[in-house]
Each structure stands twice: as structure tokens, then as C-alpha cells.
Image (tube, rainbow, N blue to C red):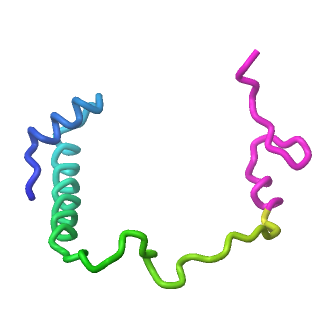
Amino acid sequence: MSVSEADVRRIAKLARLRLSDEEVRLYGGQLSKILDAMAELGRLDAAAVPADAPAASGALREDEPRPFAGRESLLANAPERDGPYVKVPRVIE
């Protein structure tokens, strides 16, 4: 399905975006590819697939708590720390 430049400009206006002519062409092509992929999926016969079927076999596992070993590596990226916590600016007076 082809998305026209007018369609892209209308979508951009609804989203309150300013797009250059180059961006309109780029996003138009990307939207066309997305809509083509959705149309292809729409042609698949999924009548035999139960609605609650998992996406892949073995994709689900028991939800069990386990220790996280990467705490220090995560906190090393924080701009400010207070012990084992990330310190953030006060937003409420």
C-alpha cells in the first residue's frame, strides 16, 4: 500500500510535527512498508490458532524471584548516588 505525501503531511499535522520534504519522503516509504507488512499478516489464516496460544513454545517460564548481580554496574552509570540509590533532583517543594 502506497502512502502519499499528502497522507504523511496530514499525519504529521495531527501529531504536531514539522517535517522537511526529505523526511516526508522517508516516512512515507517507511509507512508504506509497515502497511504492506500488516496487509501480508492479514492474509494469513489464523482461524486454527487459539487466542491464548503462547507466541513460541517454551517462551513462558515460571516467575521466580532471583538475585540481580548487576546492581553496581547499573549504579555506576547514575549521575549521582546516595548509597545504593540513584539520587534525582527534587521536583516537588
State the quadrant of the C terminus. top right
The x and y percentages for residue 64 are 74, 71
The image quarter in which residue 23 lies: top left
* The furthest residue to the right: 83
The image quarter in which residue 55 lies: bottom left
Placement of 4 over or under 73, stated as above or below: above
Q: Is residue 8 left or right of residue 91?
A: left
Q: Is residue 85 left or right of residue 20?
A: right
Q: Is residue 35 left or right of residue 71?
A: left
How many discs appear? 0
Q: Is residue 39 left or right of residue 48?
A: left
The x and y percentages for residue 72 are 83, 59
Residue found at x 62% / y 77%: 61
Residue nearest the viewer, comparing 85 with 52: 52
Residue span colored magenta:
71-93
Magenta stretch, overall SS: loop
Residue nearest the viewer, comparing 36 with 58: 58
State the quadrant of the N terminus. bottom left
Magenta stretch encompasses residue 35: no
* The furthest residue to the top: 93
Residue found at x 23% / y 35%: 12
Residue found at x 79% / y 66%: 68
The x and y percentages for residue 79 are 75, 42
Residue found at x 23% / y 59%: 34
The x and y percentages for residue 28 are 17, 50
